Image: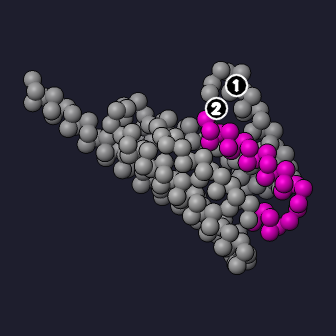
Amino acid sequence: MRNLAYAARPLFNDLASSLFFAALLALGADAVTATLWAIGFGVAHVVLWKLLGKSIAPLQWASLGLVLVFGTASLFFQDPRFLMAKPSLIYLIVAAVMLKPGWMLRYMPPIAAGHGERTMVVFGYVWAGLMAFSAAANLVVAVWAPEHWPLYKATFPMASKLALFAIQYATVRAVVRRRVMAGAQAQAQAT
């Protein structure tokens, strides 16, 4: 369980401003208030990390940029169709950021070092694919079935990401465990 927490912590940090925005909306804040608070939170979060001398990951920059750009656009346009289609643009931008080879390596716990890097690189591309699929699915529902969009938005995005996270965690853990055990066996046979 400790390794799962280790893997999830940077992801939550990278997406902090977006998660803060979603939490405010879930708690009943109006869109304008949630947007303004999320923008302020995102900027403060990055400034704090800079002051602490910590590096800012590309996904964290993307999260902040998305909150700034699309939050401002949401305030300006006040159009529900734009708000419904907005996640498609966000998913595509995130998918593009996720195409960077090896972006997921920072989520590996130290015990997995040297054993699961290739698997993590492959899952980085799988995540990019899921985000691109999510963009297309969101756009289809927003344009052709807007009456179902709130239900879609409340279920598919989170469920698909949690499912892929669980599959990835189980797969990487099994691969690393098998390789560690094979290395230990080889070492025992060599002595």
Residue 172 tag number: none
Image spot of residue 154 (x, y percent): 65, 64
Residue tagged 2: 56
Image spot of residue 29 (x, y percent): 81, 53
- Residue 76 within the magenta-colored segment of the rendering: yes
Looking at the picture, which amino acid does disc 2 mark? Ile
At x 52%, y 40%, the residue is 103
At x 59%, y 63%, the residue is 134
Q: Decide if residue 175 is on the left or right side of residue 126.
A: left
Residue 144 vertical placement versus 110 (above, below):
below
- Residue 73 within the magenta-colored segment of the rendering: yes
Instruction: Point out the stretch of residues depicted in magenta.
Output: 56-84
Looking at the picture, which amino acid does disc 1 mark? Lys
Which quadrant is home to the C terminus? Answer: top left
Q: Decide if residue 96 is on the left or right side of residue 190.
A: right
Residue tagged 1: 50
Whether residue 7 is visible, yes or no, is no
Image spot of residue 49 (x, y percent): 68, 27
Residue 45 falls in image quadrant: top right
Q: CB of mark 1 within 8 Å of CB of mark 2?
A: yes
Q: Mark 2, residues whose alpha carbon is within 10 Å: few (<14), some, or many (≥20)?
A: some
Which element type, helix, strand or loop, lies under badge 1?
helix
At x 31%, y 45%, the residue is 175
Which color scheme does this rendered protein use? one colour
Q: Decide if residue 163 is on the left or right side of residue 38.
A: left
At x 38%, y 46%, the residue is 119
